[in-house]
Amino acid sequence: LVGRMRPFGTTIFTEMSALAVRTGAVNLGQGFPDTDGPPEMLAAAHQALRSGANQYPPLPGIPALRAAIAAHEQRFWELTRDPDTEVAVTAGATEAIAASILALCEAGDEVVCFEPYYDSYAASITLAGAVRRPVTLRPGADGRYRFDEGELRAAFGPRTRLVLLNSPHNPTGKVFTAAELTLIASLCREHDVYAVTDEVYEHLVFTDATAPHIPLATLPGMRERTIRISSAGKTFSCTGWKVGWATGPAPLVSALLRVKQFLTFVNAGPLQPAVAVALALPDSYFAQFRDGLQRRRDRLVAGLADAGFAVLPAEGTYFVTTDITGLGGSDGVEFCRSLPERCGVVAVPTQVFYDHQEEGRRLVRFAFCKREEVIDEAARRLRTLA
Ligand code: PMP
Ligand code: GLN
């Protein structure tokens, strides 16, 4: 491996999932559900496989899926999209993020993002020859993550090309508030830069959250400069399908597709009609999906608190962050490497998602997108730590 990718090792998810398999530990590290998604979706995939939908789909995705993506955005977020020019199907959100950055950034351009950040952000920015300008999210006295307005303002400069925003936010479970989004939007307009929004957890904002999910693209002056990204993986519990999408104004979607042609060209032919079926499920599916995750969050949070962890509030996503200081831990990486041996549980050290790693040194992320009996077993094991 040469050049710019040399600093990137094996991802923490691969390392920790391999550790879970090797030690037989309960895996609350990598965020993937351990149950299947809606039966209507699975039946549609079977049907598509049997009826010969096994060749290359069109570059932007099959028309039925693009129409379903547009209808979903209208239904939930009142964003109107032309399915023919403003929607692109991608190989997961991961490809949409990479293709957006590769399409929009020149070498040396700067990308404003928030740390901790999902690990593919740094790699995609680096692949584009661009430079990341992370703004740190820090837990306040109430445990909620905030950023400093001055730090955000200072991150913008003459080379800023885009803001990469993830809300609801992995790994913190933060949902950016209307006031925070308004500030981000005003800086995007003032500096005339693009926004790329990773909204893969758009349907996972819990009922006790202090803020609803608001797509940045719905704020004044943002629709025309924003690529909005989501994925079937989270909402329909099919992370292995890698069906994601990007929506935005036609010139931005067209730029993204120019890049996608040479990354994967197309993906997931027989799964695309099935995701179209899932996106059209009634509102009750989305509410039940959220309520189910919220119950499991509460179950895991209770277990973690019982085991001596300081648990930070998780308002959305699959994840909850803990501080390990009370358990005598001072380094999350060491803690997570030894946890399977100590008690048979795998978690993910949050510090690997920071440029300023000391900011997350004592923080550890646990995933609660697991069956209740799995969460209970993990909690039972974690209690033996105290
Ligand atoms: N962004 C975030 C914030 C994520 O948590 C994930 C999850 N795995 C992704 C992007 C990637 O999504 P996909 O699996 O659809 O590529
Ligand atoms: N998004 C998942 C997580 O944060 C993992 C995705 C991956 O393994 N790359 O745990």
Image: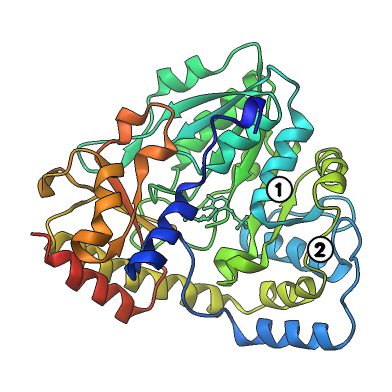
Q: What residue type is disc 2 on?
A: Arg
Mark 1 CB in 8 Å range of ligand 1? yes
Judge from the rendering whether residue 361 lies leftward or rightward of residue 152; answer left or right: left
Total labels: the figure holds 2
Give the residue at x 51% y 37%.
Answer: 181
Judge from the rendering whether residue 343 lies leftward or rightward of residue 64; answer left or right: left
Q: Nearer the viewer, residue 279 or 112?
A: 112
**Residue 327 image offset from top left, x and y in percent:** 12, 49
Neighbour class for label 1 at 10 Å: few (<14), some, many (≥20)?
Answer: many
For numbered disc 2, what is the local secondary structure? helix
Which numbered marker is on residue 96? 1
Indicate the quadrant containing the C terminus: top left, top right, bottom left or bottom right. Answer: bottom left
Which numbered marker is on residue 66? 2
Q: How far separated are the C-alphas under marks 1 and 2?
A: 15 Å
Q: What residue type is disc 1 on?
A: Ala
Quarter-wise, where is residue 227 in the image? top right
Neighbour class for label 2 at 10 Å: few (<14), some, many (≥20)?
Answer: many
Give the residue at x 30% y 73%.
Answer: 375
